[in-house]
Image (tube, helix red, strand yellow):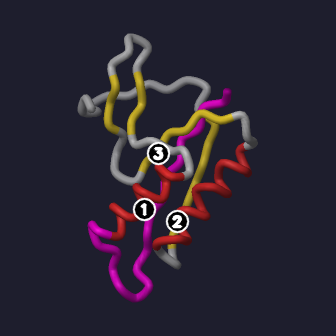
Amino acid sequence: MTRYMTRIELHENPNKPTAKDYENLHAAMEAKGFTRTITAGNGTVYKLPTAMYYAESTQTLAQVLGHATTAAKSVWNNYSAVTSEAPSSTWEGLDKA
């Protein structure tokens, strides 16, 4: 399985996205197999920064991005998205989940 990190930002359209819009995005992303947490090698689970998502999949990078953009489109019509492979990650300052 390949590890992926995805970040989605909802843009004004002309309305500004609300906390509820981001809650809807989180639910849509979860339905597509993304989580808002990441697990350290020692098993500790950490919360990712706002609107950042983690997924493990056998699908291609383009397919994973496609799932993310489908989720974003389902809740908002003006957004940006980036997905990258994350074979290893390190972090600082994340809160425990």
Are discs 2 and 1 less than 8 Å apart at CB?
yes
Residue 2 shown in magenta: yes
**Side (left or right) of 3 relative to 19:** right
Q: Which residue is mark 3?
A: 53
From which residue to which does the magenta span run? 1-20
Mark 3 Cα-neighbour bin, 10 Å: few <14, some 14–19, many ≥20 = many
Q: Where does residue 83 sit, x and y in percent of width and height?
A: 60, 48
Q: Which residue is mark 1?
A: 25
At 34% from the left and 26% from the top, the residue drawn is 45
Mark 1 Cα-neighbour bin, 10 Å: few <14, some 14–19, many ≥20 = many
Are discs 1 and 3 less than 8 Å apart at CB?
no
Rounded to the nearest angstrom, the CA distance separating label 1 from label 3 is: 11 Å
Where 8 falls versus 58 (above or below)?
A: below
**Side (left or right) of 82 relative to 26:** right
In the structure shown, which secondary structural element does the residue marked by tag 2 occupy?
Answer: helix
Q: Earlier in the sequence, mark 1 or mark 3?
A: 1
Q: Nearer the viewer, residue 89 or 96?
A: 96
Q: Which residue is mark 2?
A: 72
At 47% from the left and 75% from the top, the residue drawn is 76
Where 83 falls versus 48 (above or below)?
A: below
Rounded to the nearest angstrom, the CA distance separating label 3 from label 2 is: 12 Å
Residue type of the residue flagged with mark 1: Leu
At 55% from the left and 71% from the top, the residue drawn is 73
